[in-house]
Image: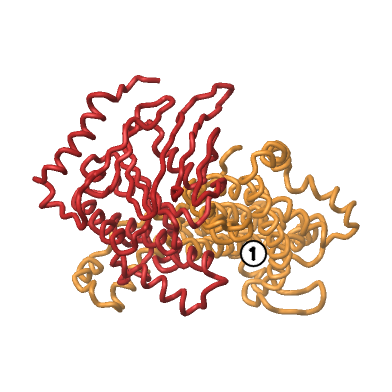
């Protein structure tokens, strides 16, 4: 079985440059628990470089799209035409005319259901595959084939099965995000040290106790790696699925804006999607770091 | 009187890919209640396999392990094992690690407060009560092994099985832990079987030393009684004639009569 575990890399937009001089001057007082100058310096060193890059990108974009026959709108036009969307994320003018934050929340709700189901079923199936050699031999080839099917390829089938767009979108999320959860959980369970198994055998833990007290905590770092990949995939899939199924999610909003030639709206929506996806990833990573503290240490 | 623990004509072979390799052949040994027995032999002679058979973690191919005339066929808390690499669960604190064992073994028979006291009693016994809320990663190797011993003792085992318990420790820590084990053995009188490859350790701690021949198809070559009075003190013993004689006997067995041949595959 292929190992899809990714390293838990520290996501930093750019390497932090050498610290400004004033920060070095204050490191002597590191014993003090609250040092406003040091905190400010640290904040500056993490925030300033990305800010510069974003500003440069906007300027380049503005220059590139300023000519009258440019096919894409420059940032100034985006700001002017989509100002309502940027400034008022929570407006609500009726069933199809709502702020982008509402749309993101609706999409997130679908992701929460689909991904939540995928997490539960994925961990259970992964535990089975990791624990039983026969389950692995039987299920692993099936998983390896199914996991390469692109998310949207499932959509017609699920539309036919559920006869409704909303459960179909949720199913697409589920089927997209479940594979990394299964595979990583299985790898984690197979890597449980033999000694932990021996401890549980000597204590005569039953299957449930073994699952809760040994297997899940021991495999937690792997499980969370799978969950993190899974949440990223499900966010990718929901936007695509909503474009086709309609409704009021953020994906449908983009499709709708394209059909009515509102390019600035699409650009704003892309920014929303990116920021939300980033937050989801950080959230799962933070939960993982909290839950698995102390697990990996020897 | 029948023996407390009886290893009755045990054979053990592993089958792998159509090839059967015989590890242990015709092991016969009886151990009395309260006895401290060491099993010594070169690496690869199957002494850990023998311990796993007594623990019930692996099944015998022929013969039987009898504890109080009952056959051992599965692992259980009455044969607690202290593993070489401590095997504490890293996500639990010292207290919680022992609590996992105690609440499983005594969950029905003792109240919460009794179980708490019992855990602390065992931590006191290995002088680790101060670290009750630490995680295994935060304490030293010797301390982890102490906690491992406390966890095994807390199960109130009929037999304590030590699988090279001090193998991964430095010499000074090892001496401290050997003293701790001797002290616990004299206080509790627990029947103990220890796997070791350290001759001094075997002579210092044991009532009897079981010497294994080299594999494949290893068996018990010789059993040496150690007629030293307890309590034993390592400094006095270092020039004691009985101690030196026992030590010499084990060394002779291991390095003259059953020299380890590296390529004996």
Q: Residue at x 52, y 64 (%)?
A: B105
**Image quarter for residue B88?**
bottom left
Can residue A19 be seen here? The reply is yes
Residue B123 in percent (x, y) is at: 35, 68
Residue that numbered label 1 is attached to = A268
The red-coloured chain is labelled B
Q: Residue at x 55, y 39 (%)?
A: B59
| Front in this rendered view, residue B77 or A106 | B77
Asked whether, in this view, residue A174 is left or right of residue B164, the answer is right
Residue B225 in percent (x, y) is at: 27, 42
Q: Is the image coloured rainbow, by chain, by secondary structure, or in one colour?
A: by chain
Residue B174 in percent (x, y) is at: 23, 51
**Image quarter for residue A34?**
bottom left
* Chain at numbered mark 1: A
Element on which disc 1 rests: helix
| Chain A palette colour | orange
**Image quarter for residue A162?**
bottom right
Taking the view exactly as shown, the residue that stands out farthest to the left is: B239
**Vertically, is A217 above or below B61?**
below
| Front in this rendered view, residue A130 or A83 | A130
Asked whether, in this view, residue B231 is left or right of residue A158, the answer is left
Count of picture labels? 1
Q: Quadrant of the C terminus of chain B?
A: top left
| Front in this rendered view, residue B199 or B104 | B199
Asked whether, in this view, residue B29 is left or right of residue A95, the answer is left
**Vertically, is A93 above or below B40?**
below
């Amino acid at each position: 079985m292929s190992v899809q575990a990714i390293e838990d890399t520290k996501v930093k937009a750019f390497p932090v440059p050498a610290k400004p001089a004033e920060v070095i001057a204050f490191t002597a007082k590191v014993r003090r628990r609250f040092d406003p100058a040091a905190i400010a310096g640290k904040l500056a060193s993490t925030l300033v470089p990305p800010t510069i890059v974003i500003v440069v990108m906007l300027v380049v974009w503005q220059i590139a799209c300023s000519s009258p026959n440019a096919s894409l709108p420059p940032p100034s036009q985006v700001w002017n035409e989509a100002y309502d969307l940027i400034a008022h994320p929570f407006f609500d003018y009726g069933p199809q005319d709502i702020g982008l934050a509402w749309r993101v929340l609706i999409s997130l709700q679908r992701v929460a259901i689909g991904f939540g189901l995928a997490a539960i079923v994925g961990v259970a199936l992964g535990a089975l595959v990791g624990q039983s050699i026969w389950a692995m031999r039987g299920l692993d080839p099936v998983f390896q084939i199914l996991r390469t099917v692109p998310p949207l390829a499932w959509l017609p089938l699920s539309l036919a099965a559920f006869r409704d767009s909303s459960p179909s979108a949720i199913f697409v999320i589920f089927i997209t995000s479940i594979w990394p959860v299964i595979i990583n959980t299985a790898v984690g369970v197979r890597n449980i040290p033999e000694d932990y198994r021996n401890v549980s055998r000597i204590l005569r833990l039953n299957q449930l106790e073994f699952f809760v007290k040994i297997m899940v905590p021991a495999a937690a770092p792997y499980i969370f790696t799978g969950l993190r990949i899974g949440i990223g995939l499900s966010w990718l899939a929901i936007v695509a699925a909503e474009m086709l199924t309609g409704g009021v999610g953020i994906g449908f909003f983009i499709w709708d804006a394209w059909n009515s030639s509102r390019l600035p709206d699409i650009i704003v929506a892309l920014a929303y999607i990116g920021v939300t996806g980033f937050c989801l990833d950080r959230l799962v990573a933070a939960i993982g770091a909290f839950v698995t503290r102390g697990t990996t240490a020897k | 009187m029948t023996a407390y623990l009886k290893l009755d004509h045990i054979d053990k072979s592993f089958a792998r890919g159509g090839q059967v390799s015989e590890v242990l052949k015709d092991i016969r040994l009886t151990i009395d209640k309260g006895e401290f027995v060491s099993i010594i032999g070169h690496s690869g002679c199957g002494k850990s396999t023998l311990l796993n058979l007594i623990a019930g973690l692996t099944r015998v191919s022929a013969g039987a392990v009898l504890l109080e005339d009952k056959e051992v066929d599965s692992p259980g808390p009455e044969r607690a094992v202290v593993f070489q690499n401590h095997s504490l669960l890293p996500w639990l604190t010292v207290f919680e690690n022992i609590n996992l064992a105690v609440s499983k073994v005594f969950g029905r028979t003792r109240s919460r407060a009794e179980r708490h006291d019992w855990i602390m009693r065992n931590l006191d016994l290995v002088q680790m009560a101060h670290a009750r809320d630490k995680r295994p990663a935060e304490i030293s190797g010797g301390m982890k092994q102490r906690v491992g011993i406390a966890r095994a003792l807390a199960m109130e085992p009929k037999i304590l099985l030590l699988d090279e318990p001090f193998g991964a420790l430095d010499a000074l820590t090892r001496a401290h832990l050997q003293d701790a084990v001797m002290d616990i053995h004299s206080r509790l009188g627990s029947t103990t079987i220890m796997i070791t490859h350290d001759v001094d350790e075997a002579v210092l701690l044991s009532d009897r030393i079981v010497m294994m021949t080299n594999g494949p198809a290893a068996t018990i070559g010789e059993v040496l009684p150690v007629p030293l009075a307890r309590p034993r003190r390592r400094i006095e013993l270092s020039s004691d004639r009985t101690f030196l004689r026992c030590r010499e006997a084990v060394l002779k067995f291991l390095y003259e009569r059953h020299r380890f041949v590296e390529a004996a595959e």
